[in-house]
Image: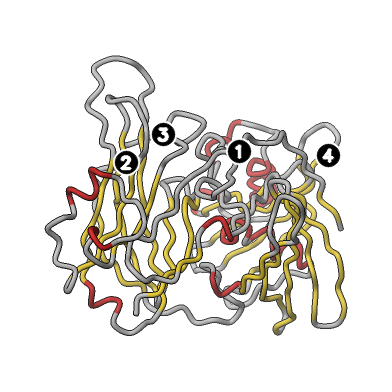
Amino acid sequence: MKYNNHRKPFRKNYKRVVAAMAGAAVISSAMLPGLPAAQAKTQEVQSAAPQTVDKTTEGRSSAHSPLYAARQYAKTHGYDISRQNLSLQWSSNYDASVLLRQDNGSTYRIKLVKNKDNTWRVVSMNKVDQQVNNMRDPVDVVKDNAAVFGFDARHDRFTLLSLVGSKAIVQVRSNGQTFKVDLVKKGAGWDITTIRGIGDMNHPATYIPASSFLYKTAGTISPAQNILYRTNIYENWKWNETVYPKDMTFGIVLENPELAKATIPEDIRKQIANVHYNTRFVVFAHLGSIAPRGYGIGIEKITQTGNVITVNVHTKSPNNAADLPPTKYSDYIAVDRAVLQNTNRIHIAFIDQNGTILNNYTIAVK
């Protein structure tokens, strides 16, 4: 099965990945496949778009939307769509996947294919087992988790290379590089085990376990989520431009910044100078080189699930030139260090308001 989704090549932009501490073991984004907005050789973020987008409003008004077709199909088959939550999981030039969630907690997966007249046709609707990736095609498993591994389900090319017994290999062409994703059969579904970057003249060979990402295998019981910080003061912000600044930077500071080997933006360095690092650590976001008015970045939520910390940031850019407020270039939050007591490594991801993974890496904390 082959999905040939073509896109124009992106210009090579360069971003810094910061794990600001002395002696930390760091997996930088340069070693990870295709991170949309925070890799060393990165693509531009297109309209700051997420990998999985809820475009329900668009679906109501457009007959050429997979959401519209899925909604009509669900309505025809007796589902009360006024009380349902439909979300576009992914969409390509050839097919799409829509999730239909019910009030009782059940979730259905609606698969669609694109007709020659650009309308969409439903080919299947199956109940999703929340504990199992219960899909017959390993390609669907990889596409559904594309954003987790830095791929783009809408534009990258996904091909089933082999399916033998309990093992499968899916090839992904992403941003000019080839990756092979290994899967193993688990119950009625598939688990992703490894992402292998194939080396060539422009890319090093890489071998990264799926566990290094924010990936939950089939049947895994999720540990409780701990909210470390939350605010709603940025909820009305919107990013109106097609790309983020090339020098946008994110980081975690575990020791005195004067001892840090990595470069920290000067305004962040000044703000965190008086933090007591024996009881606190800092996560920060810096928007980079941008105009002095109308822009902003803020940290709105930090959560911890096991040894995974997720930092949700919110960005804004002006949509007109009238009465613009001063730009908020950066934000930082000092977090209680006690949350690091029971782990040697932390997987940390910075995600914007649209769900785009801006940075995703692992650091040693002991």
Above or below, comparing residue 140 to residue 357 in the picture: below
Q: Is residue 360 or residue 311 the one in the foreground?
A: 360
Measured Cα–Cα span from mark 4 to mark 2: 41 Å
Q: Are marks 3 and 4 in contact (CB under 8 Å)?
A: no
Residue type marked 1: Lys
Would you name the residue on which mark 1 appears? 12
Q: Position of residue 23 (x, y in %)?
A: 36, 71
Count residues near mark 1 (Cα–Cα under 10 Å), then give few for <14, some for 14-19, many for 20+. few
In front: label 3 or label 4: 3
Q: Residues within 10 Å of mark 3 (few under 14, many from 20)?
A: many
Q: CA distance from mark 1 to mark 2?
A: 23 Å
Q: Secondary structure at mark 1?
A: loop
- Residue holding disc 2: 297
Q: How far is the residue under mark 3 from the one under mark 4?
A: 33 Å
User: Which disc, if any, is residue 239?
Assistant: 3
Q: Could you tell me which residue is drawn at 61 percent across and 38 percent down?
A: 12
Q: Quadrant of the N terminus?
A: bottom right
Image location of residue 134, percent across then percent down:
70, 73
Question: Does label 4 or label 1 sit earlier along the sequence?
Answer: 1
